[in-house]
Amino acid sequence: MFGKKKQPPIKSLIASDSSIEGNLTFSDGLRIDGEVNGDIFAREGASSMLVISETATVTGRIFAEHVIINGRVKGPVHASELLELQPKAHIEGDVSYKALEMHQGALIAGQLRPSGHETLEKPTLKLAANNL
């Protein structure tokens, strides 16, 4: 209804007292309350949602369809659909997204890049004075 896609269920949890070293691949939904030192990838072709809670810390690259951040991320974030930055989100790295929702208080130390705009060329500018 109203063009909204159904969100995948959260099927995996990394608890607040847990720490993972190494890359992580998931499908459907993943919630991180603990610490991850490594890249996080959603499986290709499937709907995915990654939630990084306010107690979580991620050091590494993030690739998922829908990403919700309220914790700390040190590395680039790639949300192929929607990126939601909650008030306590703190990202140190470049961010790419199709749609962005950013709450007051969220911080990004990096570049914001809407996906799909990388191939656009800048128009050539000519000065009117050159045509005299």
Image: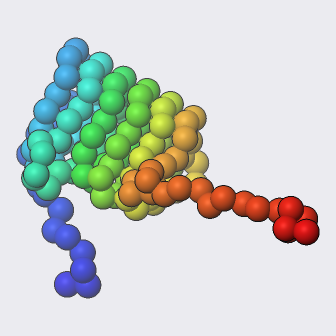
- Quarter of the image where the N terminus is located: bottom left
From the viewer's perspective, is residue 79 above or below residue 75? below
Query: Measuring 50% from the left and 31% from the top, which residue is drawn there?
Result: 92
Q: Residue at x 43, y 53 (%)?
A: 119
Residue 15 in the image: x percent, y percent? 20, 30
Can residue 111 be seen at all in this image of the molecule?
A: yes
Q: Position of residue 75 (x, y in %)?
A: 41, 28
Residue closer to the observer: 50 or 54: 50
Position of residue 48 relative to residue 77, above or below, is: below
Residue drawn at 48 percent across, 49 percent down: 113
Position of residue 79 in the picture relative to residue 123 (left or right): left
Furthest toward the top, the residue is 21
Q: Residue at x 25, y 52 (%)?
A: 65
Q: Is residue 2 above or below residue 8?
A: below
Specify the quadrant of the image occupied by residue 25.
Answer: top left
Q: Position of residue 62 (x, y in %)?
A: 30, 36
Q: Quadrant of residue 99?
A: bottom left
Residue 87: image location, x then y, percent = 50, 49
The correct choice, above or below, for 106 with respect to 102 in the image is above
